[in-house]
Amino acid sequence: MRLRLNSEYGTLKAVLMHRPGAEIDRLTPYNIEEYLFEDMPYLEQMQREHDEFRSLIKGATGATVYRLLDLLVETMIDDNLLLDAMELALADKGLSYLAGDVIARMSTMECAQAMLAGVKVRDLKAKRLHAKVLDDMPDHSFVITPNPNGYFMRDPAAVIQTGVISCQMKYPSRRREAMLMRLIMENHPLFKGAANIVYPNENFESAATKPYPFIEGGDIIILSEKALAIGNSERTSGEAIREVAKQVLASGDVERVYEVILPPKRNFMHLDTVFTIIDENLVVTYPDALQAVLETRVYRKEGVDPDGQTILSTEVLNKSLLTVLQNEIEYLEVINCGGDNPDSASREQWFDGANVFAIGPRRVISYNRNIHTNRKLREMGVEVLRIPSSELSRGLGGPRCMTMALDRQEF
């Protein structure tokens, strides 16, 4: 697979998704804050909604929809990779030395599910794994923590113009998501040799064990073939953006990387909660954001130092995000989330009204609950395909958040 994208809106050809699983039922009133949730979704209904979402993508585009669990199992058929992944998953609790015993008692599918849904002490005891360290731990405690945010496939990696950005999640409860994605990108037959990892420049084990500046895929938006925008947000650091800019600009294929400074507000968590691009000159946005964002930095390649590292030039734009987008996108048209009603805008932004998923030019998938945003989209000639959202939306992420676009039709 090519693993290069030049737009956010080209007709979708391949996408990666994760159907929510047992990890959702690991959420309790006592741990939802640790796992970055504000509520506990009802899993069975959540799965029905996700199945409808996946079926809609396939039916509307004919795109190939890859499932994370399938790719993980197919990758971990390699015994060495399975052992590496299990050691890393157990490392958080200082139990890497148990990896061999664990995989000896579990199938490859069970191991893959454990990476996503977690494993408790009682689960290992039920598999007749006896170790003194387990006897000293409460039966209900986690040996491998769950990844309930895993259905937000946008964040652990991002396919851009020059390859793949392998992300580093800010919060520990999400870091295994990026580790598993890197494992798949480097080793699955579908991607091996085709996934040009532009950041970080380290192999799988180094990237998984060595902290580097945090960056998440929801902050990464392709503005055009020559321009990339990355939000400096609660979950993506300026240091990471500058390092990514050096790598992305090195080839000359991308000429501008924009660092968009987002206000530290919950509803500005990622750049794609602020705006998404759904055609070459059409964006849907949270209206307050275009005026609230008043600083953007533009990085360009100025030269190369004696060590062959890219030297960046930096231009600071003390202008609104609207002005920045107008300068980059000719004949820009803007659709406001929630329409023209401030109350509707605020309410629908909370449920990611601006976070639609473009499956083609002026063709989007949106939550059915965002009725005012959907009406405005249709008024602008956008085809809106709606999905149910009573449970999927409880994680506070929209259709774009739940999809990692892998391939689109080029223009």
Image (cartoon, grey):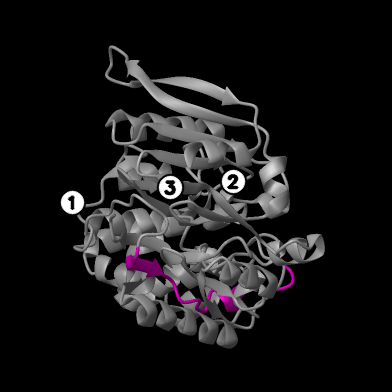
Front residue of 227 and 267: 227
Q: Is residue 178 above or below residue 366?
A: above
Q: Are marks 1 and 3 in contact (CB under 8 Å)?
A: no
Q: Is residue 105 visible?
A: no
Write the residue at 36% across / 60% down.
10
Give, as a three-letter code, the residue at label 2. Answer: Arg
Residue under numbered circle 2: 235
Name the element at disc 1: loop
The quadrant holding residue 37 is: bottom right
Write the residue at 21% across / 59% down.
1
Q: Residues within 10 Å of mark 3 (few under 14, many from 20)?
A: many
Name the element at disc 2: loop
Residue 97 at x, y percent in the picture: 39, 57
Instruction: Using the image, tell me which numbered label, if any, was put on residue 377.
Output: none
Q: Is residue 186 above or below residue 118?
A: above
Q: Earlier in the sequence, mark 1 or mark 2?
A: 1
Front residue of 76 and 101: 76
Residue 99 at x, y percent in the picture: 37, 62
Give, as a three-letter code, the residue at label 3. Answer: Ile
Give, as a three-letter code, the residue at label 1. Answer: Gly
Image-based side of 156 in relation to 199, left or right: right
Is 16 within the magenta? yes
Residue under numbered circle 3: 222
Is 23 within the magenta? yes
Image-based side of 16 in relation to 334, left or right: left
Q: Which residues are magenta?
A: 11-30
Name the element at disc 3: strand
Q: CA distance from mark 1 to mark 3?
A: 23 Å
Front residue of 176 and 411: 411
Residue under numbered circle 1: 193
Residue 338 at x, y percent in the picture: 70, 65
